[in-house]
Amino acid sequence: MEWSRYTASLTADAARLAEVVDGHMDAKVPSCPEWTVTDLVHHLGEVYEHKTLCIKLGAEPQPWPPERAATAPLTRMRTGLGHLLAEFTGREAASPAYTWYDPDQTVGFWARRMAQETAVHRADAELAAGVAITPIAEDIAVDGVDELLTIFFAWAFARWPEECAPVVAEGTGEAVVIATGDREFTVRVTPESVTVTEGDTPADPAVRISGDPTDVLLWLWRRVPDDKVTIEGDAEEAERLHRMLASFTQ
């Protein structure tokens, strides 16, 4: 995907979030029960500050995190976003940057990650404000499903197997198909492995989870209930995967 799509999505979702939280800063965020909207907005501001430094320094900022700024949360978020977008504008997608994802040490990784981070948190803000979730653009949402399954889940297990082993201990190895947009991912989890493949969908998986890209992405991130997606087959297997993903998407 062109990285301009990520920066455009990031900008639009941050603007929508700022719009929707007006008058709701003390509201609880139902999808993040320990947070108020103030916490959510401060979190995004801190995330934008951190990624800006990852790009500028080419290393992980230390010490981190800083003490919470006295700045108003929306001011902090907007300022942090402005600095981050300035870094994106001044570099190419392939420009080097520190990231936690070993295979991709580029600015483009952060453009993608920040677009996805902001899309999910924008939905959090809408849930907190009690308004309907604005659909995420299909290409961004499907890309988010890809990122979550292949990086947050499969790659993270391969990178930190000992830490992840207790989470996947209940894996059965059964095929779980996740289908949305024009893509289908097959996930298999055992106590020793997590694999995600695309393009060779089994004819008879244990369970198939499908739906609109926004709903599938937000279901995977545990932002919407099961009835937002279609679950065909072994519902227990779907719930097992959902439980495991929760630990990888804290």
Image (cartoon, grey):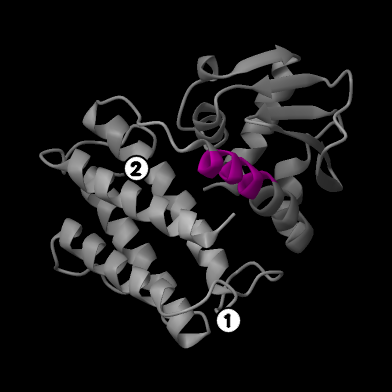
Outermost residue on the left side: it is: 23
- Residue corresponding to mark 2: 122
Q: Residue at x 14, y 67 (%)?
A: 71
- For the residue marked with disc 1, what is the amino acid? Pro
Horizontal side, residue 125 vs residue 113: left or right: left
Q: Does the magenta segment cover residue 81? A: no
Residue 4 in the image: x percent, y percent?
47, 60
C-alpha span from label 2 to label 1: 28 Å
Instruction: Say which of 164 and 110 sits in front.
Output: 110
Q: Residue at x 87, y 48 (%)?
A: 192
Of tags 2 and 1, the one toward the viewer is 1
Location of residue 66 in the rendering, given as x and y in whole percent from the top left corner = 32, 74
Height in image: 193 above or below 67? above
Above or below residue 77? Residue 205 is above
Say whether residue 123 is visible.
yes
Apparent side of residue 186 relative to residue 9 in the rendered image (left or right): right
100 with respect to 126 (left or right) = right
Residue 61 visible = no
Q: Position of residue 175 (x, y in %)?
A: 84, 29
Residue hosting label 1: 96
| Residue 146 falls within the magenta-colored stretch | yes
Q: Position of residue 96 (x, y in %)?
A: 58, 81
Picture quadrant of residue 62: bottom left
> Where are the magenta residues, as a range?
139-149
| Relative vertical location of residue 85 with respect to residue 15 in this rendering, above or below | below
Q: Are marks 2 and 1 in contact (CB under 8 Å)?
A: no
